[in-house]
Image (spheres, helix red, strand yellow):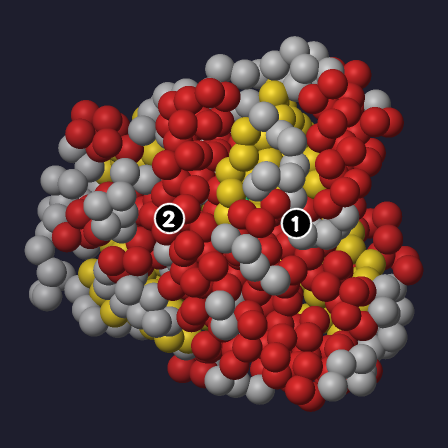
Amino acid sequence: MCGIIGVTCNPSANAPTRASIIITKALKSLEYRGYDSVGIALIDPSSGKLIVKKSDGMLDKVSKEYGFEGTPGFVGIGHTRWATHGPPTQINAHPHTDCKEEIAIVHNGIVKNFLELKKDLASKGHSFKSETDTEIVAHLLEELSNRNNDFFNALKRAISMVEGSYAIAVITKKEPDKIFFARKESPLIVGLSKNLNLLASDIPAMLDYTSSFIPLSDGEVGWISPSDVHIENLNGEIIDTKKRIVTVDWKSDMVRKSGYPHFMIKEIHEQPQVLKNTYDGLMSDDILDRAADVLASGERIFVTAAGTSYHASLILKLFIERLTGRIVYPFIASEYRVVENLAHKGDVIIAVSQSGETIDTMKGLRAFKARGAIAMSITNVMGSTIGRESDFTIPMRAGPEIGVAATKTFLTQTLVASLLSIKLASKLGKIGMDEEKTMLSELADAGRVAGEAISMTEGVVKSMAERIHAVQNMYFLGRGLGVPLSYEAALKLKEISYIHAEAYPAGESKHGPIALVEQGFPVFFIVTSEMVSELEGNIAEMNARGAMTVAIAPFKLKERLGTKAIIAVPDAGNMLEPYSLTPPFQLLAYYTAVRRGHDPDRPRNLAKTVTVE
Ligand code: F6R
């Protein structure tokens, strides 16, 4: 999705090109969100005019061609565009300007009523250069600020006329030290630093300059100058910004590749450490006890998420149901409208989201909350919207995840799910204190198991990637815990290697999918230590049809399964099996993508955080 950066520097303490250097560097760190065009706008300190440089294409090329970094100015905005209205072209790239080229705007989101606004503005003499919805807002601001000299009031008026979702950053010649902003449903965060303030769509883009942030809420509008921040809410109330500051312990080197060729492989290798951080963090706090109290007293438990986070939600369901006997109702976040009317007071809704900004998950959570459900979330980003709007938030502590394909956050979500299920089982009296203690301490090994799985399988997986890189279709099959893991394995492979992979409960494969299987068709089995004999039957069925069967399976089952190849992982208890079985399929997706010549960090058409419905 689009990325926004804004920087306003104090001229007496900063060089005239500092803002453009900061903007260009921040755009680099926003690349992971996915984009097709890039641009910047600054106010030239000598002429007072707007300088806009933009084009379709990747940052390195465009920035070099247009000289982004040498652009003078103490105040500026930048943008990475992920096309929605109008194809990726030079004209459609952001920033967009008004007729007089006095206002420049960057925007993330969708202005739903832009055609209506455009018609009205055209009748008032405005002419448009691009096909975008964003440009309309520049002209609307021009129109309203012409009538009224107060630019901030014009922005507030404009926002009241715009329907849809937006994170907006605007600069104007009229107030050259400020960046104006507004937010509804798209993330936008203020960064506070010395002699400069920043604005960006995510925290990693600002980590080189600060660890203090103010995440903006829906309906908030305001401005930043080098030394001030002003925020108002929808009712015109001025926000006490000091009370809203959050400090993060993320460091800027966490968002660098540190010698790895891609973020994805770095993040796969970080799993042993982040699982330890998650475990230690949660065990040194009473947060899980409190969360389990909420779940124990709640009537029904719903869980919602998208993509990889949804697969972790299925693991949460499985563990809670197994350990407590209570039913958990998971639903795909974008389908919340189908189930929202089921929610009522006393229910608990758990939103699982790495970013805490996924629009579908946010809307699902809000819909349930509006009907009286208690809102709980499991998120990775401090101060994210989903976290702020929840009554109760459990942090995942995975550190920043830059690779578009979720890896370390899947396993940390899974760890939170496992620990929470154990705590809930204990609260409900389904397990005794000793059993609780044993199970919790078993999970202290999650990181170690993931580390061993990586070292044990990386070499074999690389050769496997060589074998499968040219295939077009494949299956992942499993039973029990192996089902959500298979869903996740198929998603990983699909999204970065572009091989069509589907996942099914192994038994279900006979009810249709097996029709595709012929000589050499790859079928991967994710084997846990449960329902092994049933899986052996499924493996035999696939072998009989000539499939290239491969098992990702515990070492102890190596001789037994009968697949044509095996990727053996460390033996581990059932609750630890996600940490032994997941790294090999993440590595498989990674090495297959690389072998096929794709950049795993920038899968086509995908964005790290999906902020439009
Ligand atoms: C897949 C992936 C996505 C996300 C999904 C939800 O690798 O990363 O499927 O899991 O977009 O994102 P969050 O967890 O940020 O809500």
Q: Is residue 293 above or below residue 45?
A: below
List x then y, in percent, for residue 131.
51, 25
Q: Secondary structure at mark 1?
A: loop
Q: Is residue 338 above or below residue 602?
A: below
* Residue on which the image places disc 1: 528
The amino acid on which the numbered mark 1 sits, given as a three-letter code, is: Thr
The amino acid on which the numbered mark 2 sits, given as a three-letter code, is: Ser
* Residue on which the image places disc 2: 455
Q: Nearer the viewer, residue 19 or 491?
A: 491
Q: Nearer the viewer, residue 591 or 248?
A: 591
List x then y, in percent, for residue 25.
23, 47
The residue located at (31%, 70%) in the rendering is 211
Q: Is mark 1 within 8 Å of ligand 1?
A: no
The residue located at (39%, 40%) in the rendering is 458
Q: Nearer the viewer, residue 54 or 2?
A: 2
Lateral position of residue 14 relative to residue 427, left or right: left
Lateral position of residue 521 relative to residue 224, left or right: right
The residue located at (28%, 64%) in the rendering is 251
Give the spatial CA distance, label 1 vs label 2.
19 Å
